[in-house]
Image: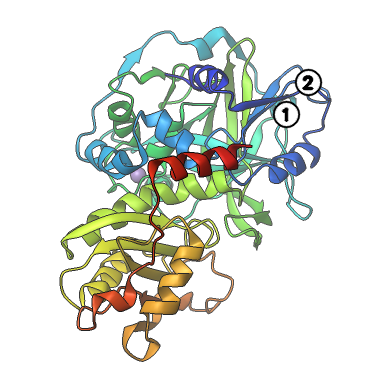
Amino acid sequence: MSLKSFLEQMENRKEVLHIEDEVSPNFEIAYIMKSFSDNGPILLFEKVEDTKTKIAANVCGTRRRLCEALGVEQHQLYQRLLEAWRSPKKPRIVDDGAVKEVVEEPDLLRIPVLTHFERDAGPYITSAVVHAKSLDGTTENVSIHRFQVLDERHLAIRLVPRHLYKLWQMAKEAEVDLDIAISIGVHPAVMLAASSPLPFGVCEFDVANTLLNDNLRLIKCKYVDAYAVADAELVLEGRISATKEVAEGPFVDITGTYDIERKQPVVEVVNVMHRRDYVYQALLPSSTEHKLLMGMPFEAAIYEAVSKVVPKVCAVNLSVGGSGWLHAIISIEKQLDGDGKNALLAAFAAHLSLKHAVVVDSDIDVFNILDVEWAIATRFQAGEDLLVIENVRGSTLDSSANQETGLTTKMGIDATRPLSKPKEKFEKARIPASKRVEELTRKLHSL
Ligand code: MN
């Protein structure tokens, strides 16, 4: 259950586009990735300038591929994630793994790390799965972070104040550097687990192991006290400095705008391991892939929270247009008027970065934005169905939030049909069709 095995599986499904022309990691690959970033295939760049290493991109770029990675249908996805969150299982620690085929002195400049956008501060590693432990070994964490390549042995890490930041703070208080293992090129299930909103203290590798049906294997690093994925493509062993900081950024984040330059800690890389013919995994910031990986676990969190306040939640979409992060569309089976607003409140509580949310009835397809707009047009009255919450904490990624206080205004739209009015007025008109006409129409579309 590795990136390699997933790529083979997708190859059989004709989901991999091989690019044989030579391209540069400096903008060229990112440019091509961007052109395929909306529901495109996996891209395998076979010939990369100045290196023998191939680059895989857009691996988790569609909902369908992520569902296939977990072996579920779309409607089973949230349940699968929620079950895994509730039943983490320790992966086996093994002595040997494919990633140990080559063990060498660090030279980060030999890895074909992409430079993505015009004003980015430099080349950035964007698919890095980071494992770290508390000094007493009782708390483990796995999360995805961006790393700016500074030189042969040094990276800058962006530490948003969450779990890894907390472990780093604890190490800082003890005046020691924090050991980390950076795994690059892993199975999509590991990426999804690492992006899941789990409480501090739950090790995301354990959740990944449950998602992979107990097939995740870890290795202990050679020089640092941390674990890496045994069949990753590439592993960097490093230490986050307790004292050394550097200017990190600007860098394009999920909304497609530039995140600002900040002082961030330096990571010294002390050892590199990789498969002999390793594939470097690229992930384009602000692509659909980025949005799905960050957003999908939160769809499950919203699904669970809203399920507690209304009888039935049908689907949740953190829409790509809302950067997979700021906009949610939730379909419910409503029992009483007012259910819609309660659903909105639960959604805002489940995903703190959520800014705008729309609740619709079960006959609306949350993934079809035209259908959602139709529901707003025909079932929503701003005077009654609009929920506005001012001065609340939202996402730091929202350019329009108050830049000093970080506060934002949240808006909920209850576009469910009012139960007090006749149902027929809101019914979607359909055209009756025989099997023969249905079949004929399908055929016409496939021409
Ligand atoms: Mn965590």
Say which quarter of the image contains residue 309: bottom left
Location of mark 1 (residue): 112
| Residue matched to label 2 | 51
Q: What SS does tag 1 mark?
A: loop
Where residue 320 sits in the image (x, y, percent)? Answer: 53, 56
Q: Position of residue 51 (x, y in %)?
A: 78, 20
Q: Mark 2 near mark 1, Cβ–Cβ under 8 Å?
A: yes
Q: Is mark 1 within 8 Å of ligand 1?
A: no
Q: Residue at x 33, y 70 (%)?
A: 427
**Residue 272 vs residue 149: left or right?**
left
C-alpha gap between disc 2 and disc 1? 7 Å
Closer to the camera in the image, 60 or 368: 368
Q: Residue at x 43, y 8 (%)?
A: 96
Label 2: how many Cα within 10 Å (few below 14, some 14–19, many 20+): few
Spot the residue most to the bottom: 383
Q: Amino acid at mark 2?
A: Thr
> Which of these two is toward me, 134 or 393?
393
Residue 298 placement (x, y as % from top left): 37, 52
Relative side of 240 to 162, left or right: right
Quadrant assignment for the N terminus? top left
What residue appears at the point 82 percent right and 30 percent down from the top-left corner?
Answer: 23
Choose the circle earlier in sequence order: 2 or 1.
2
Looking at the rendering, the quadrant in which ligand 1 lies is top left
Q: Is residue 272 above or below residue 165?
A: above
Q: Is residue 179 visible?
A: no
Give the residue at x 67% y 54%.
251
Q: Can residue 150 be seen in this snapshot?
A: yes
Query: Assess mark 2: CB under 8 A from ligand 1?
Result: no
Q: Is residue 385 above or below residue 228?
A: below
